[in-house]
């Protein structure tokens, strides 16, 4: 099932996030990642929702979101030219391998070491959905202790 | 008439009363409680008519029946906690059928929210998915705007219920904000004007169609499009079937009427849909009770869909010609683009299918009263009064027989819980309808199951001398489920036998109880209504004639055969062409 990235502009008010999330989950759809923050206009928040589903399901989600009173617009950016980025923080144990091989993989992806502990490294990585997945595939053989992911944010390039 | 002028500097509770008045509310259904006392205090002595239901669910259904019968916004006020949670079923019922309601709930004071205070419930959380929109009001200064927005949201686009949750300290706080006259909500712009290119595509499809069918739903009633639907049908020889919610949108006495479509639809409607080359959905949503098995629905037809709700289009059935917009505006744009076509072959075929009538039943040899015959008697007796008639129903077999055996000719003349299928809707919705339509003969058709789900509201009919005629089709059964058990579950009558006889072993009741409880005539009389029981058609007709001429509310209990089925029927998951026509096949 293809993942779709939805950009949703909503009024920045209490209760709006719960309404959007409840709408999606209440209809049996699954949210993979969700990111919310203020937009260019501080009274409007931009949500980026990554949601797996076929075209019919996504079209229905988009239509249901669009009719909410607090929603300005909904864009399925997936099929349009866009840039998407996700930030991840990753803590890897260095006990078994030492630091060098982990840093090598990180450098291949332009990731940065942002924390050093006696037996672990914390790495910051920024990339598209695809890059993040590739990076995770390569670091998983190491002893990964913890992962924090921001969820995708996206911007249409038209 | 000068508009009502609120005084300067007023409490939140006063804002509620002012807001209701300034938005055209004349009657409010209200049940008080600790966190709503301030609002009721301001209702005291106000020009608003206050009707006290005996349960909050009844109150919401009354507001709903009032709204459906009049087209106005129905209003209700309840208290926090259980008062608000009791409205959930009523909100869901209104949401499904697009009924405009504004429901105001008391809430514990802002500082107590989240502390599990006495009678605290998360009302906006609980009602989020059963309202078009809801508000928790955090400052009294927001309240005048919120009330105006609520009426605007409830009554525009696809209408629906709006809940406003008002903490007690917000009701008591003072504001100098005036009432809001012109509402503008930044992110809410319901689609009204249909895209002209799509209307042109629809016109082209209609002009080329040899076997078109109009499939008309509740949206035609809500948008006030019924005369245009008639013009479209009669002007261009297009037969019309309606959904349950669309009954009355097109006169069923017309030779173009196919009657109701779907699970209990007519032979004519279901055949016409299956044989059509163009299905024009107008304010209907192609729901599962209409389409039967989707894969086999109208296979030879192009599907067109006019709906104000973009999310309704393409949701269930693949749509070739979507038109998102107000139905009335769409039809106004469409009609001048149509040309007369010769559809005499199609109309001849329709006339043949129409010979099967909307539904039929076989006379019985055991002499038991048949529920279908009772509905036909209601139809005859009601028409004989010469008054406008509003038929309200409960849910189940009674509802389907009322749909099938009453000839629906007027918009807003049939009030029923279509989408939600809410038992207990029949009694209070009829009361609300009668309040809104004092001129009409309001008849409420119920089964013996649903009648007891809001039976307490009978007292309201007496108190306000609302001359509703409540009919109970008493088959001692929860009849629709009993029918499904007979057809699809090997006749295993689990929890559907309300009389003593015929119950399974694990539902056996104490042996020396009478055969059936309660005595509905006795209960009705205890509530102060006139009441009578009929066991034959002749008795039924005599009682109906007396009751319909009487200015008081009545309960008329008809003891009907326990094993009558609603037919025709399309079994769940079957295609519309696979109708069960009578009991033996």
Image: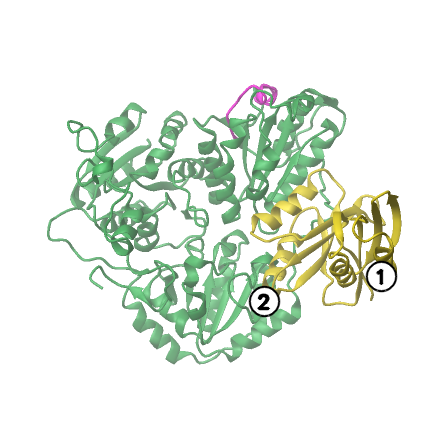
Chain colours: A yellow, B green
| In this picture, residue B563 sits left or right of residue B126 | left
Pointer 1: what residue?
A109
Residue pictured at 75% horizontal, 58% vertical: A136
Circle 2 marks a residue in which chain?
B
Pointer 2: what residue?
B322
Residue B38 in magenta stretch:
yes
Q: Where on the picture, by quarter, is residue B520?
A: top left
Residue B497 higher or lower than B528, as above or below = below
1 vs 2, front mark: 1
Span shown in magenta: B28-43
Mark 2 lies on a secondary structure that is strand
- What separation in Å lies between label 1 and label 2 (alpha carbons)? 46 Å
Q: Quadrant of the N terminus of chain B?
A: top right
| In this picture, residue A36 sits left or right of residue A62 | right
Report x, y in % for residue B27. Answer: 52, 32
| In this picture, residue B390 sits left or right of residue B540 | right
Residue B418 in magenta stretch:
no
């Amino acid at each position: 099932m293809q993942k779709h990235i939805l950009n949703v502009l909503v009024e920045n008010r209490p209760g709006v996030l719960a309404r959007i999330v409840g709408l999606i989950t209440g209809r049996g759809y699954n949210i993979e990642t969700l990111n919310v923050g203020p937009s260019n206009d501080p009274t409007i928040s931009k949500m980026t929702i990554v949601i797996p589903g076929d075209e019919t399901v996504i079209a229905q989600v988009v239509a249901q979101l669009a009719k909410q009173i607090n929603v300005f617009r909904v864009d399925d950016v997936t099929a349009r030219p866009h840039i998407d980025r996700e930030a991840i923080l990753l803590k890897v144990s260095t006990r078994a391998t030492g630091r060098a091989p982990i840093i090598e993989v990180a450098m291949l992806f332009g990731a940065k070491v942002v924390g050093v502990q006696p037996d672990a490294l914390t790495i910051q990585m920024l990339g598209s959905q695809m890059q993040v997945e590739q990076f995770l595939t390569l670091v998983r053989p190491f002893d990964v202790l913890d992962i924090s992911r921001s969820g995708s944010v996206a911007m249409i390039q038209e | 008439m000068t508009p009502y002028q609120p005084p300067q500097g007023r409490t939140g509770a006063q804002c509620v009363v002012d807001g209701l008045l300034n938005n055209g509310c004349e009657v409010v259904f209200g049940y008080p409680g600790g966190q709503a006392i301030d609002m009721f205090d301001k209702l005291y002595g106000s020009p608003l008519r206050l009707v006290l239901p005996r349960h909050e669910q009844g109150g919401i259904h009354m507001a709903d029946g009032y709204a459906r019968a009049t087209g106005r916004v129905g209003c209700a006020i309840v208290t926090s906690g259980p008062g608000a949670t009791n409205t959930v079923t009523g909100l869901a019922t209104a949401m499904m059928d697009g009924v405009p309601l504004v429901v105001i709930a008391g809430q514990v004071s802002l500082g107590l929210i989240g502390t599990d205070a006495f009678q605290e419930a998360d009302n906006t959380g609980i009602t989020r998915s059963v309202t078009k929109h809801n508000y928790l009001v955090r400052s009294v200064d927001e309240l005048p705007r919120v009330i105006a927005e609520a009426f605007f949201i409830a009554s525009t686009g696809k209408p629906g219920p709006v809940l406003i949750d008002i903490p007690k300290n917000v009701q008591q706080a003072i504001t100098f904000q005036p009432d809001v006259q012109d509402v503008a909500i930044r992110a809410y712009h319901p689609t009204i004007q249909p895209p002209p290119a799509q209307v042109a595509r629809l016109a082209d499809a209609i002009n080329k169609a040899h076997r078109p069918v109009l499939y008309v739903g509740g949206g035609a009633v809500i948008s006030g499009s019924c005369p245009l639907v008639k013009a479209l049908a009669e002007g261009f020889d297009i037969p019309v079937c309606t959904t349950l919610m669309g009954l009355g949108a097109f006169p069923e006495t017309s030779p173009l009427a196919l009657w109701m479509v779907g699970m209990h639809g007519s032979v004519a409607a279901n055949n016409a849909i299956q044989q059509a080359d163009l299905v024009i959905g107008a304010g209907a949503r192609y729901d599962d009770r209409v389409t039967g098995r989707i894969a086999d629905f109208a296979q030879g037809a192009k599907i067109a869909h006019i709906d104000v709700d973009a999310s309704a289009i393409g949701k269930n059935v693949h749509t070739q010609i979507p038109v998102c917009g107000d139905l009335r505006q769409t039809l106004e744009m469409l009609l001048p683009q149509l040309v007369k076509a010769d559809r005499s072959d199609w109309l001849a075929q329709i006339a043949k299918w129409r010979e099967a009538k909307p539904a039929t039943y076989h006379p019985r040899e055991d002499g038991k009263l048949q529920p279908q015959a009772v509905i036909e008697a209601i139809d005859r007796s009601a028409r004989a009064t010469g008054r406008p008639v509003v038929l309200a129903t409960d849910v189940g077999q009674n509802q389907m027989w009322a749909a099938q055996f009453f000839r629906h000719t007027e918009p807003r003349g049939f009030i029923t819980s279509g989408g939600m299928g809410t038992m207990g809707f029949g009694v209070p919705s009829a009361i609300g309808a009668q309040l809104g339509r004092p001129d009409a003969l309001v008849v409420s058709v119920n089964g013996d199951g649903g009648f007891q789900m809001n039976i307490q509201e009978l007292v309201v009919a007496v108190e306000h001398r609302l001359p509703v005629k409540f009919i109970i089709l008493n088959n001692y059964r929860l009849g629709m489920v009993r029918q499904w058990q007979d057809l699809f579950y090997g006749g295993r009558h689990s929890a559907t036998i309300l009389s003593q006889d015929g119950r399974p072993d694990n539902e056996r009741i104490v042996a020396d109880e009478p055969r059936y409880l309660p005595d509905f005539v006795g209960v009705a009389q205890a509530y102060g209504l006139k009441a009578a029981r009929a066991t034959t058609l002749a008795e039924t007709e005599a009682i109906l004639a007396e009751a319909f001429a009487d200015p008081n509310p009545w309960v008329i209990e008809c003891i009907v055969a326990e094993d009558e089925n609603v037919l025709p029927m399309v079994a769940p998951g079957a295609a519309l062409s696979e109708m069960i026509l009578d009991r033996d096949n």
